[in-house]
Image (cartoon, rainbow, N blue to C red):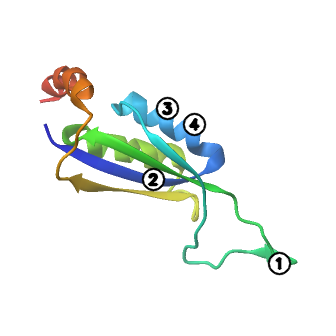
Amino acid sequence: MRFKLIISLVEDDKTDTVMEAAREAGATGATVISNARGEGLEKARTFFGLSLETQRDVLLFLVEEHLSREILERIAEVGEFDARPGTGIAFQIDVEDAVGVSHQIERLSEVVEEKL
């Protein structure tokens, strides 16, 4: 079984919504890294030196490759990434190898067989 890592940077108030949508699309869990920050095309706004941008969370999903595109699209939809600039991004990368996922492989085998 092959895996992809989906990395998503979302506004912290959308973290739970994005995680729930990813689970519904086939993700078996996630790791959340809180309080990330960054800049996009537009420089961050400030007020008397204080940043006005919302906090971001980094969500890491290790998913089976046949489910990855559907999960990625669902994350983008509920996160409103294409609807509003600056709401977040998500991308996926290939995972060469992973350990500690044998319990997930058993569960995912049935799901992937149904999809194929």
Ranked by sequence position, the earlier of labels 3 and 2 is: 2
Q: CA distance from mark 1 to mark 4?
A: 30 Å
Q: CA distance from mark 4 to mark 3?
A: 6 Å
Inspect the image, locate mark 4, and give the three-letter code of the amino acid beneath it. Answer: Asp
**Marking on residue 76:** none
Q: CA distance from mark 2 to mark 1?
A: 28 Å
Q: CA distance from mark 3 to mark 1?
A: 35 Å
- In percent of the image, x 19 and y 22: which residue is there? 106
Q: Which residue is mark 3?
A: 20
Ranked by sequence position, the earlier of labels 2 and 1 is: 2
Counting every numbered tag in the picture gives 4
Ranked by sequence position, the earlier of labels 1 and 4 is: 4
The relative height of residue 42 versus residue 73 in the rendered view (above or below) is below
Q: CA distance from mark 4 to mark 2?
A: 12 Å
Q: Are marks 3 and 2 in contact (CB under 8 Å)?
A: no
Inspect the image, locate mark 3, and give the three-letter code of the amino acid beneath it. Answer: Glu
Inspect the image, locate mark 1, and give the three-letter code of the amino acid beneath it. Answer: Gly
Q: Which residue is mark 2?
A: 8
Q: Residue 94, percent across and down? A: 22, 54
Q: Is residue 80 rendered to the left or right of residue 106?
A: right
- In percent of the image, x 82 and y 78: which residue is there? 49
Helix, strand, or loop for circle 4? helix
Helix, strand, or loop for circle 3? helix
Q: Which residue is mark 4?
A: 16
The local crowd at label 3, few if under 14, some if 14 to 19, many if 20 or more residues have their Cα within 10 Å, is: some
Q: Which residue is mark 1?
A: 49
Ranked by sequence position, the earlier of labels 4 and 2 is: 2
Q: Residue 100, percent across and down? A: 27, 34
Q: Is residue 102 rendered to the left or right of residue 13?
A: left
Q: CA distance from mark 3 to mark 2?
A: 13 Å
